[in-house]
Image: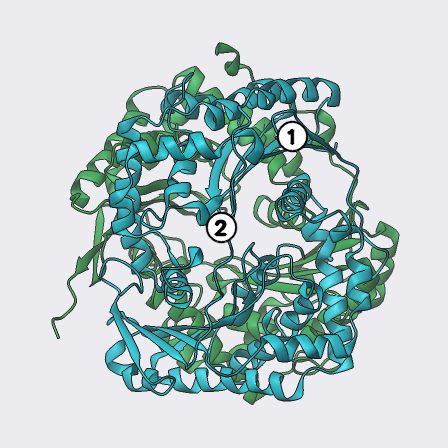
């Protein structure tokens, strides 16, 4: 089947800027709207450009804690009222915090549009800080940490790996915060976090769904524009010094299988090497024909193996994770990974394999746009991390432009022993009772 | 992240609805081929993608009792070599097209799902057909898959949030019930290549196939190709679903304690007999479960998370499968507050039993369920294909969607409260706790006359 080498022909219409319209309000909040009337529903996403990178030691995790507190009552809609009112009107919500951003995600029938503006404006402007709610929510966040870190081998190893790879930059600490900080956050920490990060000019609002742009604009002017502009968060000054030698960390805990994480420092989301690294990730890990699947999983060395890089405002890491099979020495899986990375450095990726990876990524561009919620998240992420939502509509060109030479050069530049951190979970037998 | 568990809840009720007008299924066609295979075509333009969803009746309940996992292993191996292609060639071709292919099982069916760019309709269909209809099950691939799955059980048991689900199923339903036999080390050990070949030959036949083509495609050309491909399958014998075993009913509370000495929190499930997918009570039950444990402001999440801060998440779900299933409360809390959290969950359950729900609560649940229904049911071609497959599998008609809002609106407070009292009982419950047994053994003993104890490191699940 040689025809498979054909490039995917993306329909230019679909990658055009499908009716996206924007407006920046007088207070600096950017509004991005894509109308879609296929179903009578709306996805409304608020991207606040504040995350754990804006924190300081002693109050790590406060961005995420604040995210939780945003649901615990404001002036007009008191404790529990945000969720109750929303659900009673057919809506639901969630939120997430990362190193870089805090995002609030609302999904609701279009009949609830004005209500959502009213509730969001209320909590952005007049969040209350009830001491009782703070204590109860502290318990919730600690439970979240226990689930995703303390009782998750992969989560615990990941935290250790990142803390080793980043010595100076705030990506050193976990988004959930160190346990002792979770125990000690104060109301003052929350208040100062709010005044630092929640200025309207530090926010992008994305609405996709059954709305009209002029209607969104009128509601934005009524509810959001009166919130005064303030200073945005101070720039994150600390830059991670160049890593000058391999770092190794070990976690010993009871487990049945080891886990390995490998981190290599790479640039931020706006760097032109990022599409190249995304293609590398696809070649190595996407699908059962990928190099790491073949080399590690199909060969019976590992249960799972893969790697990739997320978008970040500051230089970040390319991460590989491997779960070795029982009886396999982690040194063997490590060696196999390093050999695959060395192969990327020494041999150009064959044309057919590069074409395959690009086809996978181009098809994924379509898959990633099936729902209003996915498109709201994509538009907001492109706006925040790449500086312009419209780059979403030229993502196919960025992928197509990646060459075998660029892959080889990027592999040589980033996948070096000096630049890597290796974290290994070595299972410990439980104590005999 | 604010909540993980909650988003899954209503999904569990697979059928699942704007305050505005009734949402309707988009146009589709249904056809029965001479060999018994049922084929649906659902066209949706907008994205140049087409998907093939193929259901094979049987699923986990068709596993022989001693070979739990047979249907699932068979599904995983479909892509690992066929009459036309080696496993490597299959993966290479799927990936080169930018396509996807996956297959798995649930209680009553195997589902294979593949998606391609519309222009690759023919090539994609050929790949799907090769995998489903002419798999070779090479001995080497069988051996590798079974060995990998056995190791996979170790990773699952290292992950308490995942492991508790299999412990609960095994303990609540028991090994005499098809839902009580999660695959384990011993069942994988017994499966031979010939079992897989035989299972495939017997089950993947015309009378058991449901094929759904959804997305952007040329209807006439698609129909010709699909009819030719799936029409050539031998009709075979329709899979006979097992007669429904008596649902497990406790005469006293039962308790399973799974020891994971390094756990710092206790994961727990509280289970009781529930319903089957086709129950006439399904719509009021969806509404009641929404209020009890199916959304963020639900009674159980409000008590255990919002008000007390005992957990990151507490929820309830209603299993909607072919046979009568379970209704479960699921949560976790730090080891020290295990008793407090379980007691509180029981108190909320008792409260629903004693006081029922109010008219105001019912109205809120109706709005909530309807409000999110379009995003989950008719937004994408995949969602519609999923609904069509379920309708066919469970013998439901399109009113399941088209009349859903009317059915929701028609539920009276009396009906909802009758359902709440009938299904959310507080007696003779089954408790499964996974955590540090040395610290919670006494707590576990509070909930039943006898505590069965297992080690998370041991092979198997709750089987005795």
**Which chain is green in the picture?**
A
Side (left or right) of B439 relative to A274: left
Inspect this view and state whether residue A72 appears.
no
Look at chain B in the picture and name its colour: cyan
State the separation of the CA atoms marked 2 and 1: 37 Å
**Residues at marks 2 and 1 touching, judged by CB atoms closer than 8 Å:** no
A45, A39: nearer the viewer: A39
Q: Would residue A423 appear left or right of A187 to someone viewing this image? A: left
Q: Which residue is mark 1?
A: B49
Please tell me which residue lies in front, B37 or A373: B37
Q: Can residue B71 be seen by looking at this rendering? A: yes
Left or right of B261 on screen, residue A190:
right
Residue B145, located in which quarter of the rendered image? top left
Q: Residue at x 40, y 36 (%)?
A: B74
Above or below, A79 relative to B191: below
Q: Secondary structure at mark 2?
A: loop
**In the image, residue A79 lies at what x, y percent?**
65, 82
Q: Residue at x 79, y 74 (%)?
A: B412
Whole-percent x, y for residue B459 in the image: 23, 58
Say if labels 2 and 1 share a chain: yes
Mark 2 lies on residue: B242
* Residue A160 horizontal/vertical position (percent): 30, 59
Colour style of the rendered protein structure: by chain
| B117 up-or-down from B458: above or below | above
Query: Which image quarter: residue A57?
Result: bottom left
């Amino acid at each position: 089947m040689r025809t498979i080498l054909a490039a995917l022909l993306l329909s230019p219409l679909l990658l055009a800027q499908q009716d996206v319209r924007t407006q920046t309000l007088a207070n600096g909040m950017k509004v991005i709207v894509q109308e879609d009337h296929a179903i009578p529903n709306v996805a409304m996403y608020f991207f606040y450009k504040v995350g754990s990178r804006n924190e300081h030691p002693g109050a790590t995790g406060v961005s995420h804690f604040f995210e939780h507190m945003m649901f615990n009552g404001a002036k007009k809609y008191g404790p529990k009222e945000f969720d109750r009112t929303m659900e009673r009107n057919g809506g639901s919500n969630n939120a997430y915090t990362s190193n870089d951003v805090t995002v609030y995600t609302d999904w609701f029938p279009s009949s609830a549009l004005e209500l959502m503006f009213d509730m969001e404006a209320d909590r952005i402007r007049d969040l209350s800080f009830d001491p009782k709610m703070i204590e109860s929510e502290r318990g919730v966040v600690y439970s979240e940490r226990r689930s995703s870190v303390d009782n998750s081998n992969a989560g615990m190893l990941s935290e250790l790996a990142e803390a080793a790879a980043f010595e100076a930059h705030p990506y050193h600490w976990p988004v959930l915060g160190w346990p002792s900080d979770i125990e000690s956050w104060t109301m003052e920490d929350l208040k100062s976090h709010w005044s630092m990060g929640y200025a309207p000019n530090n926010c992008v609002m994305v609405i996709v769904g059954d709305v009209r742009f002029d209607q969104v604009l009128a509601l934005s002017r009524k509810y959001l524009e009166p919130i005064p502009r303030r200073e945005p968060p101070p720039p994150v000054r600390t830059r991670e010094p160049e890593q000058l030698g391999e770092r190794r960390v070990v976690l010993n805990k009871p487990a049945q299988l080891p886990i390995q994480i490998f981190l290599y420092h790479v640039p931020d989301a706006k760097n032109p090497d990022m599409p190249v690294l995304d293609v590398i990730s696809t070649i190595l890990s996407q699908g059962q024909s990928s190099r790491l699947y073949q080399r590690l999983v199909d060969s019976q060395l590992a249960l799972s193996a893969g790697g990739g890089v997320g978008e970040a405002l500051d230089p970040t890491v390319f991460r590989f994770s491997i779960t070795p099979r029982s009886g396999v020495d982690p040194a063997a899986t490590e060696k196999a990974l390093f050999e695959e990375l060395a192969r990327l450095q020494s041999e150009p990726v064959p044309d057919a394999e590069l074409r395959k990876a690009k086809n996978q990524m181009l098809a994924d561009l379509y898959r990633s746009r099936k729902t209003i919620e996915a498109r709201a998240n994509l538009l907001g992420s492109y706006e925040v991390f790449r500086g312009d939502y419209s780059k979403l509509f030229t993502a196919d060109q960025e992928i197509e432009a990646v060459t075998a030479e660029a892959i080889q050069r990027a592999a040589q530049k980033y996948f070096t022993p000096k630049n890597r951190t290796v974290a290994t979970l070595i299972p410990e037998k439980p104590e005999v009772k | 992240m604010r909540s993980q568990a909650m988003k899954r809840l209503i999904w569990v009720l697979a059928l699942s609805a704007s305050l505005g007008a009734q949402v309707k299924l988009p146009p589709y066609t249904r056809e029965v081929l001479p060999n018994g295979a049922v084929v649906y075509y659902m066209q949706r333009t907008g994205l140049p993608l087409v998907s093939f969803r193929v259901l094979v009746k049987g699923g986990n309940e068709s596993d022989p009792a001693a070979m739990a996992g047979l249907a699932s292993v068979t599904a995983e191996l479909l892509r690992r070599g066929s009459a036309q292609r080696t496993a490597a060639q299959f993966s290479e071709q799927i990936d080169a097209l930018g396509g996807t292919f996956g297959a798995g099982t649930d209680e009553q069916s195997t589902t294979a799902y593949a998606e391609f760019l519309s222009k690759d309709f023919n090539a994609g269909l050929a790949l799907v057909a090769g995998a489903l209809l002419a798999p070779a099950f090479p001995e080497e691939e069988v051996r590798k898959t079974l060995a990998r799955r056995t190791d996979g059980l170790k990773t699952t048991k290292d992950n308490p949030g995942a492991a508790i689900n299999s412990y609960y199923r095994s303990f609540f339903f028991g090994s005499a019930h098809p839902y009580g036999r999660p695959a384990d080390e011993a069942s994988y050990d017994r499966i031979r290549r010939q079992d897989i070949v035989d299972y495939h030959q017997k089950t993947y036949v015309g009378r058991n196939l449901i094929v759904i083509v959804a997305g952007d495609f040329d209807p006439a050309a698609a129909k010709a190709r699909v009819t030719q491909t799936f029409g050539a399958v031998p009709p075979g014998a329709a899979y006979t679903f097992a007669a429904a075993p008596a649902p497990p009913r406790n005469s006293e509370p039962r308790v399973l304690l799974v020891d994971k000495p390094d756990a710092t929190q206790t994961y727990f499930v509280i289970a009781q007999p529930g319903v089957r997918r086709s129950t006439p009570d399904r719509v009021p039950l969806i509404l009641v479960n929404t209020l009890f444990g199916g959304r963020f402001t639900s009674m159980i999440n409000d008590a255990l998370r919002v008000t007390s801060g005992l957990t990151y998440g507490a929820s309830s779900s209603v299993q909607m499968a072919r046979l009568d299933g379970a209704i479960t409360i699921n949560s976790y809390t730090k080891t020290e507050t295990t008793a407090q959290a379980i007691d509180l969950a029981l108190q909320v359950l008792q409260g629903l039993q004693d006081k029922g729900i109010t008219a105001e609560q019912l109205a809120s649940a109706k709005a909530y369920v309807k409000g999110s229904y379009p995003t989950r049911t008719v937004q994408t071609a995949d969602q519609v294909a999923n609904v069509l497959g379920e309708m066919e599998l469970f013998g439901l008609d399109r009113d399941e969607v088209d009349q859903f809002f009317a059915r929701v609106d028609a539920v009276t407070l009396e009906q909802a409260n009758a359902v709440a009292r009938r299904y959310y009982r507080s007696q003779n419950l089954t408790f499964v706790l996974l955590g540090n047994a040395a610290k919670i053994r006494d707590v576990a003993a509070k909930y039943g006359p006898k505590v069965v104890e297992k080690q998370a490191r041991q092979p198997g699940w709750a089987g005795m």
